[in-house]
């Protein structure tokens, strides 16, 4: 019996699943300063996480999927068994250092913006969850020639990750990085 490990990562703005339960994303704040909406926007444009296109955005999500399995040989044929798929994810959001001193109107606008930005980033994490589930389904019970089974498993995993990476790019294009979902500091 052999143990094989596979891993793929997607780092996206706006980056498996352990079956039992996926862990919650790790949240990473980045500090911003300002007393007006324009100053906050400028800080997010200057300090926000970078996406695959190199541009900075107010928030970001990353997900990574890894998998490992054992395989059992039956002559020249092998079958995957004891599959474990794991998802890890993180969300990066701005932390407005002067939020407590903000006037009520700007503070409320900020709070609404932050809720919608997090909702958008959670959409990316959901893509990671779906990719992990698809990998689990694709690899469960996979069998074939012992000489090519590991390559088959790796290829299937890479194809699924590529499809969900493209889905993340399309999601950002459709939502304008969350703007159509309300992730706009409207003040």
Image (spheres, rainbow, N blue to C red):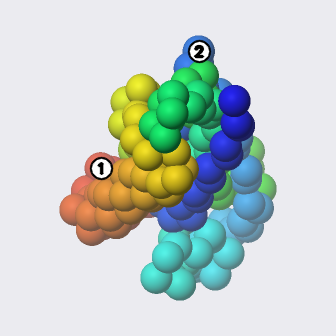
Q: How many marks?
A: 2
Name the element at disc 1: helix
What residue is shown with label 1? 181
Q: Residue 137: x percent and y percent?
A: 37, 30
Name the element at disc 2: loop
The residue drawn where x is 41% and y is 34% is 142
- Say which mark, if any, is on residue 69: none
Residue 114 higher or lower than 84, as above or below: below
Whichever of labels 1 and 2 marks the residue nearer the N terminus, that label is 2
Residue 135 higher or lower than 81, as above or below: below
What residue is shown with label 2? 20
**Residue 5 visible, this angle:** yes
Q: Which residue occupies the foreground of this view, 40 or 104?
A: 40
Task: Please state which of the two labelled residues, at mark 1 or mark 2, is closer to the viewer.
Answer: 2
Q: Is residue 113 left or right of residue 85?
A: left
The residue drawn where x is 32% and y is 64% is 166
The span from disc 1 to disc 2 (Cα, nearest Å) is 31 Å
**Residue 124 visible, this angle:** no
Q: Which residue occupies the foreground of this view, 112 or 72?
A: 72
Q: Residue 48: x percent and y percent?
A: 62, 70
The residue drawn where x is 22% and y is 62% is 174
Q: Please state, as top left, top right, bottom left or bottom right, where the N terminus lies in the image.
A: top right
Q: Residue 136: x percent and y percent?
A: 45, 32
Pointer 2 local density, CA inside 10 Å: few below 14, some 14–19, many at least 20: few
Q: Residue 104: x percent and y percent?
A: 56, 44
The residue drawn where x is 53% and y is 60% is 10
Q: Which residue occupies the foreground of this view, 138 or 25?
A: 138
Residue at the far front in the pictured view: 75
């Amino acid at each position: 019996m052999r143990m094989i490990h596979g891993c793929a990562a997607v780092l996206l703005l706006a980056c498996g699943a352990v079956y039992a339960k996926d862990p919650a994303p790790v949240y990473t704040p980045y500090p911003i300063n300002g007393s007006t909406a324009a100053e906050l926007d400028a800080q997010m444009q200057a300090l926000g996480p970078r996406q695959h296109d190199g541009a900075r955005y107010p928030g970001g999500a990353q997900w990574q999927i890894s998998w490992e399995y054992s395989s059992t040989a039956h002559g020249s044929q092998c079958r995957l068994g004891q599959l474990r798929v794991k998802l890890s994810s993180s969300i990066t959001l701005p932390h407005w250092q002067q939020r407590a001193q903000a006037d009520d109107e700007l503070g409320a606008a900020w709070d609404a913006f932050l809720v919608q930005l997090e909702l958008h980033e959670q959409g990316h994490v959901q893509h990671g969850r779906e990719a992990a589930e698809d990998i689990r389904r694709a690899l469960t019970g996979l069998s074939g020639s012992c000489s090519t089974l590991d390559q088959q498993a790796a290829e299937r995993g890479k194809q699924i990750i590529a499809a969900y990476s493209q889905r993340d790019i399309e999601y950002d294009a459709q939502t304008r990085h969350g703007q159509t979902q309300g992730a706009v500091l409207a003040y």
